[in-house]
Amino acid sequence: MKVLYAASEAAPFIKTGGLGDVAGALPKALCEKEIDTRVILPLYQDIPKDWQER
């Protein structure tokens, strides 16, 4: 199974509330179950530059 997870925030990249916690943790949990998981986020200016270039 493949999952594309789109969110407005995800820890550790950018987080302002609870959604960021869930959007950061759920993809990791799915990967542990060997589910191909990708996350897409808006390219906010507040995301550290080293994360933007990966």
Image: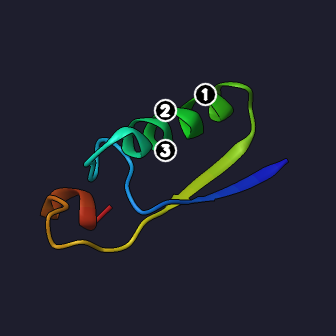
**For numbered disc 3, what is the local secondary structure?**
helix
6 displayed left or right of 21: right
Residue 18: where, in percent of width, then height? 38, 38
**For numbered disc 1, what is the local secondary structure?**
helix
Q: Are marks 2 and 1 in contact (CB under 8 Å)?
A: yes
Would you identify the image quadrant in which residue 4 lies? bottom right
Choose the circle earlier in sequence order: 3 or 1.
Answer: 3
**For numbered disc 2, what is the local secondary structure?**
helix
10 Å crowding of disc 1: few (<14), some (14-19), many (20+): few
Could you tell me the amino acid type at mark 3?
Ala
What residue sits right under mark 1 in the picture?
A: 29
Q: Which mark is residue 25?
A: 2
The residues tagged by marks 3 and 1 sit, at their Cα atoms, a distance apart of 11 Å
2 displayed left or right of 23: right
Check the image and report above or below for 5 versus 24.
below
Residue at image coords 31%, 43%: 17
Residue at image coords 75%, 39%: 35
In the rendered image, the quadrant that contains the C terminus is bottom left
Residue at image coords 78%, 53%: 2
Could you tell me the amino acid type at mark 2?
Ala
Q: Are marks 2 and 3 in contact (CB under 8 Å)?
A: yes
The residues tagged by marks 2 and 3 sit, at their Cα atoms, a distance apart of 6 Å
47 displayed left or right of 38: left
Residue 14: where, in percent of width, then height? 26, 53
Residue at image coords 48%, 44%: 23
Q: Which mark is residue 23?
A: 3
- Most distant residue in the right direction: 1
